[in-house]
Amino acid sequence: MIRSVVRGNGAALPRRIMKNADFEGMVETSDEWIVQRTGIRQRHVAADDETTASLGEDAARAALDSAGMTPADIDLIILATSTPNNTFPATAVEIQNRLGMHHGFAFDMQAVCSGFVYAVATADLYIRGGLAKRVLVIGSETFSRILDWSDRSTCVLFGDGAGALVLEAEDGAGAITDRGVLAASLRSDGVHKDKLFVDGGPSTTGTVGHLRMEGREVFKHAVGMITDVIEATFSEAGITAEDLDWFVPHQANKRIIDASAKKLGIAEEKVVVTVDLHGNTSAASVPLALSVAVADGRIKKGDLVLLEAMGGGFTWGAVLLRW
Ligand code: UT7
């Protein structure tokens, strides 16, 4: 059985760090409120010359380096983003060109914060279906560009950044001991579309628009949705929470992460938390968290890793893989 195995990973963050205290003169908020309600302490914010394409390119180059590969080795680029450089063409194609890659194909995937989880599951299907052997999966976002900087209920929550994985086809035994993507569960339900959305777009206002969120409503649904897809993934793979080495959730709110881990019976020391460092970077949050836990030696070859995300749409999903 063909498996999609992680060969390398990488990340890129804008140069500028914005601390919670930096908001105190801009909107009525405090470091204490932000830390208590979300766990966020700082986030990176892109300068004019830092875009979804440039950050995505940097993360992709780092992932290729760690895989010992060059763009010539890649057949497909999937970029998860909700903040593309342009309405079209796909920013994935711009990254392809920046990498000097003029073969294969590239496209964007839009599932907001769940984008990276959707993209890994999609890359796995392209690999197992035989359409690609090596795939660059990137999550890159510049949410700072779509924030309403006068709205304290959203502007303190998000940050910019990018992360990437290189996946490669490898023969596996079809067993849980195989390396690579082992199981996935994806969901969406557009009935929730008005709880987290951008109030502009090419076909409606002709503008880019700003992010709007009913935070409490999103919070209310998050834990149940997250745990549902994770339980589906566990049951597909025939494992329990105890079998996991690492839980790498979407980094939106420390309270959501803690409540999900508790409900699933995942031990605290197995949970990778980076929301304090990056804020919510939407589709970049899971690969950024992976990059931190790989760099500090926590995630190692052979570890069983669970990825999860939930966001606008709503969309939600989980992927189980052996690193
Ligand atoms: O990535 C996609 C998924 N997104 C999420 O998962 C986000 C989910 N939601 C959340 O994380 C939380 O709901 C928030 C962090 C957004 C808000 O936390 P909360 O505990 O749900 O607070 P709340 O919205 O119920 O607001 C409590 C109070 C309100 O004041 P009143 O009405 O009680 O007087 C808000 O106006 O906190 C106020 N508030 C703030 N105060 C200081 C809202 N934002 C701020 C702020 N600073 N930045």
Image: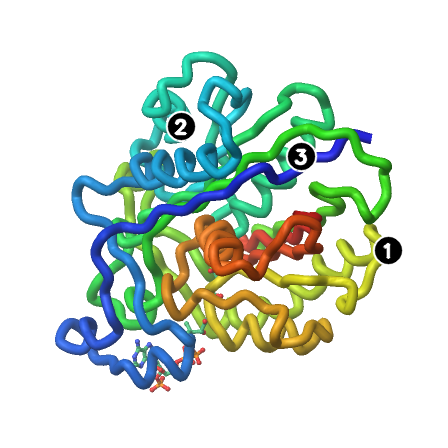
- Tell me: 76 left or right of 61: right
* Quadrant where ligand 1 appears: bottom left
Identity, as a three-letter code, of the amino acid under mark 3: Asp
**Residue at 53% of width from left, 45% of height from top?**
116
Asked if labels 1 and 3 touch by Cβ distance under 8 angstroms, the answer is: no
| Sequence-earlier tag: 3 or 1 | 3
Identity, as a three-letter code, of the amino acid under mark 1: Gly
- Tell me: 316 left or right of 201: right
Instruction: Tell me the residue that label 2 is attached to.
Output: 90
Where residue 180 sits, quadrant-wise, is top right
- Tell me: 120 left or right of 235: left
Single out the mark in the foreground, 1 or 2. 1
Element marked by disc 2: loop
Say the numbered circle drawn on residue 238.
Answer: 1
Q: Does the Cβ of the disc 1 residue fall within 8 Å of ligand 1? A: no
Where residue 85 sits, quadrant-wise, is top left
| Sequence-earlier tag: 2 or 3 | 2
**Residue at 41% of width from left, 46% of height from top?**
11
